[in-house]
Image (tube, coloured by chain):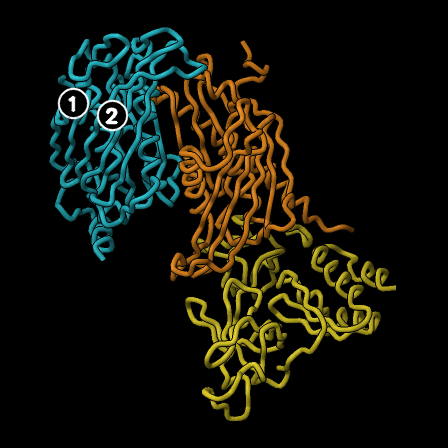
Chain colours: A yellow, B cyan, C orange
Amino acid sequence: MKSREVVLPGEELEERKGRKLGNGVYFEGDKIFSKVLGMPRIDENEISVTALSGTYTPRVGDKIVGVIDTTEISGWSVDINSPYMAFLPISEAVDEFVDRDRTDLTRYFDVGDIIFCRVSKVTKNMVVQVSMDDYSARKLINGTIVKVTPTKIPRIIGKAGSMVTLIKNKTGCDITSGQNGVVWIRGEEKSKAIEAILMIDRDSHTVGLTEKIEKFLG
Amino acid sequence: MEEKYALELMQKGKRIDEREFDEFRKIEIKKNIIEKAEGSASVKIGETHVIAGVKLNIGTPFEDRPEEGVLIVNAEFTPLASPDFESGPPSEDAVELARVVDRGIRESKCIKMEDLVIEPKEKVWSVFVDIHIINHDGNLMNAAGLAAIAALLNTKIPKIEDEKIVRGDYEKDLPVVHYPINITICKVGKKYLIDPILEEENAINSKLTIAVMEDDSICAMQKQGSEGIVFEELEDMIDLAIKKTKELRKLIKCR
Amino acid sequence: MKRIDGRSEEEMREIEMKLDVVKRANGSASVRFGNTEAIASVYGPKGVFPKFLQEDHKSVLKVRYNMAPFSVDDRKAPGHDRRSTELSKVIRLAIEPAIFLEDFPRAGIYGFIEMLQSDGSTRVTGINALSMALATAGIPMRDLITACSVGKVDDKLVVDLNGEEDCNGQADLAFAMLPNKNLVTLLQMDGILTKEEIVKILGYARNSCKKIFELQKQTLKERYKGEE
């Protein structure tokens, strides 16, 4: 398998030989096929294909950037860049006791607020719950969000955060990336940061991307 | 619920009503049942009941076929026939059924369209075949196809006096020269099945409707269902269709 | 004796395929066979509205096939007619077997095909485009879907019918399959053919789909080729 050649849905990969199956693949007997248009990842332990495009499928434990969509009676409904809305219950958002009858929930979170939170529950038919009960969870004040293909987020972050640190340093921006493909940016040079991020989203499969981004950021 | 049961049985090679996989239900055909229509037929396949009525009107020919009559086939899936039918514009299933039955009739050239000219390039007979579902218990397509050809076979062309149609007074028979019959072959597991009842039909997702002429040539095909058919199976399905439509043709062939 | 446009029996028209033609869509592609040109775009998986239309265990799949008014000789009135209703249904059923709908319960996947130019074999051209649009949208599939038309014109069994052959020929058959799985997902025929003729042109159809599939593969792989 050429390391930089994309695979198509239905394309046969290798025989399973007892290996674990990751995302983007399906099996028929011992044969493994790609499910998506993407980059294959095959080693002695696992076979998977990283999709080059597609929507976000929520998984428990994911750290994501969401936007408050509506205020409900006992919590908020959150847009998580997925076909599925998530629910943030008051109990998972606020530490203190909240008297639902007398409190206006918008004092905590209002429509349009951007939050960094954790996916806490996902049922079999994709009813999703998120929680702010995590050391990294917080409201992201001001700034803008940009949406990219969720599978490109690791490339945007880079090995040990190298890529996102590069962008932060060169643009002086605050950047928070959600595993759901939503990236929050705040700072004076945010348009430059956004362009760099979109460049990675578009060209993530190419070699020499790091140099290209370095060159662009100056 | 019943679909699951029907499917389980079929996978074991059995059917709810204990028929063979290649056996039709009881078929009842009644001709000329609607006085006001120029031709009509009622077909019952088991509890599935379809009525086809043929009306003739004077119309203008199509620009690209100026010396031929016009054929229009329509189907009504009225809410009367099934809790699954809704009133309003025809559903995609009703449209599909009408168009497949139409193609079976049209492509086989079973009506001699050239004989339907009243005034060349100006006036021709428009043949309206309207299919009305009365009760839906599966296999509507085959019942409708049978009703349509049966109705056409007893259709008479009315007389024209002073440029007006004299209804009830007939000049001659509608010239029908071929006998296309359609049949839907279903695939369940490794076996082929015909004439599904409603529960069976809802459980089967692999079907091929084939219209066969009296000389064994095929004049229409339509794959249905949300599952694929293995390429090599197509020939088997066509063979079964040719064989089984002969039984149906015997039922309608007398005028 | 050659065909109207000089082609031999098994020769297809000139084929052109492009990706990402509708920027706002999640995935899109255009395919041209001679003077027949289709654009396809895919949206989703996304939420379903109204909610009661969603299905608990899988995604709903909706396909709309439409012909632009200027795509034919005699302007076609805009809007849905019976033909586009039937074609929307058969095209949806032609691609459904390929898609892992169960991966997105309670969501919806929406496919749109617009015929910009219509010179025969429109539905199969549309399916070829929609298949690639689904792939570029990241929709999980068992296989791509490849389609072509075959038929009988002037007593010859032929591949890829143009408009005139479609109208005036003796039979035409629209065919689609999952190329790696040997599964037929679209089969419509009208005209008069013997069983032997059908078996023969089905063979032509499968062979032609193999060639078209190679082009789809090439187009998709080229688009994502790593630059050294």
Other-residue count near label 1 (Cα within 10 Å), few / some / many at <14 / 14–19 / ≥20: some
Mark 1 highlights which residue? Answer: B252
What's the amino acid at mark 2? Ile
The residue lying furthest to the bottom in this view is A97
Can the viewer see residue A58?
Answer: yes
Q: Is residue A114 left or right of residue C105?
A: right
Residue A206 percent location from the top left of the image? 73, 54
Residue C115 percent location from the top left of the image? 55, 34
Labels 1 & 2 near each other (Cβ < 8 A)? yes
Which picture quadrant has residue A214? bottom right
What's the amino acid at mark 1? Ile
Q: Is residue B80 left or right of residue A169?
A: left
- Give the mark, 1 or 2, whose residue is nearer the N terminus: 2
Chain under numbered label 1: B
- Which quadrant of the figure contains the C terminus of chain B? top left
Chain under numbered label 2: B
Kindly indicate whether the residues beneath marks 1 and 2 are on one polypeptide chain. yes
Residue at 55% from the left image edge and 31% from the top image edge? C69
Between residue B170 and residue A189, name the one nearer to us.
B170
Rounded to the nearest angstrom, the CA distance separating label 1 from label 2 is 10 Å
